[in-house]
Amino acid sequence: MPPREKSELQVFISSRDSTCGECHEALGRRSWITLCGEKGALCLACADLDHLVFLPAGDMALTRRARQHSTLCAVVLKWSRVRKRYERQGFLVEEAALDQAEEECLNDADARARRRERVAERRAELDGEYVARFAGRVRELYPHAPPGREHEIAEHACRKYSGRVGRSAGARALDPDAVYLAVAAHVRHSETTYDKLLAAGWARHDARDQVNGRVQEILHSWEGEAEHHPATGAG
C-alpha cells in the first residue's frame, strides 16, 4: 500500500496507462490520478482537484506556508523503481494560497523565479480569444455574478491540456450546460465549505450532496430571470 499522509489527500503520478473510472478518458502514462475504491483511478478533474496547482518539493519554507494557507491540499507521490517505494514529489495547493506564500517569501530569489515561471506557463496555456468568448458567455448566462468572476471561471476552465470542462466540445460551442458545469464547479470551490469537507475526509459525492443546496442558491442568484436552468442534480 502507498504511504498515507495524515489528513491529506493523495495524488499519484501513474507509471502505467490509466483510464479514468468516472469520465472513462484514457489518461496515458505519467498521468496524475487519485484512487477511488471500486472506480479505481480518477483524473484530477473528476476528483475535483484540478483547481489546485503543483508546488514541487524543495523549498521547505514556501511549502510550509502554502500548506498552511491552503484549505485543500494533496501530497503528490511517484513510485521509485530504484527504492521500491512511493516518494513525495511535492504538493497540490490552492493557487491563492501559493500566491500568499510566495508574497511572504519574496525575499527568496528562487520563489520569485518560480512565480515568474508559473505566470508564463499560465499565459502559454490560455487561448486568449477563446477565454474572452467563454467569459462573455458566462456573463451572459449569469449576469448577476460578482464582477470579474467570469474571467476567473473562464481562465480556469479553458486552460489547454488540462482536461477541464472548458476544453470539451460543448464548451467550445459555448453550450449553456457546459458553461453551467464550469460555473457550478467555481461556486462549489469558492463559495461553499466543499473543500473543507474534502480536507476533513468526506467522500466526494457526500460532500457534493452536502453543499449542493448552497451551490444552486448562488447559481440562481447569479442568473437572469429568463436564463437556462440545468437540472439541479448536476451541481
Image: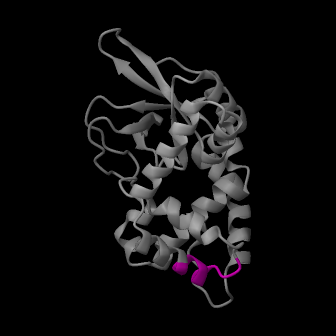
Query: Height in image: 71 above or below 215?
Result: above
Asked if residue 224 lies left or right of residue 47, the reply is: right
| Rendered-image quadrant of the C terminus | bottom right
| Rendered-image quadrant of the N terminus | top left
Q: Which residues are magenta?
A: 136-144
Q: Residue at x 61, y 22 (%)?
A: 60
In the current view of this chain or complex, which residue is farthest to the bottom? Answer: 226
Asked if residue 83 lies left or right of residue 188, the reply is: left
SS assignment for the magenta stretch, majority:
helix
Q: Residue at x 62, y 40 (%)?
A: 98
In the rendered image, residue 221, in percent from the top left (x then y), is placed at: 74, 76
Q: Residue at x 60, y 79 (%)?
A: 139
Q: Quadrant of residue 190?
A: bottom right
In the rendered image, residue 31, in percent from the top left (x then y), is placed at: 34, 39
For residue 105: magenta? Answer: no
In the rendered image, residue 214, in percent from the top left (x then y), is placed at: 74, 62
Q: Is residue 235 visible?
A: no
The foreground one among 65 and 87 is 65
In the rendered image, residue 63, in percent from the top left (x then y), is placed at: 61, 28
Query: Height in image: 166 above or below 196?
Result: below
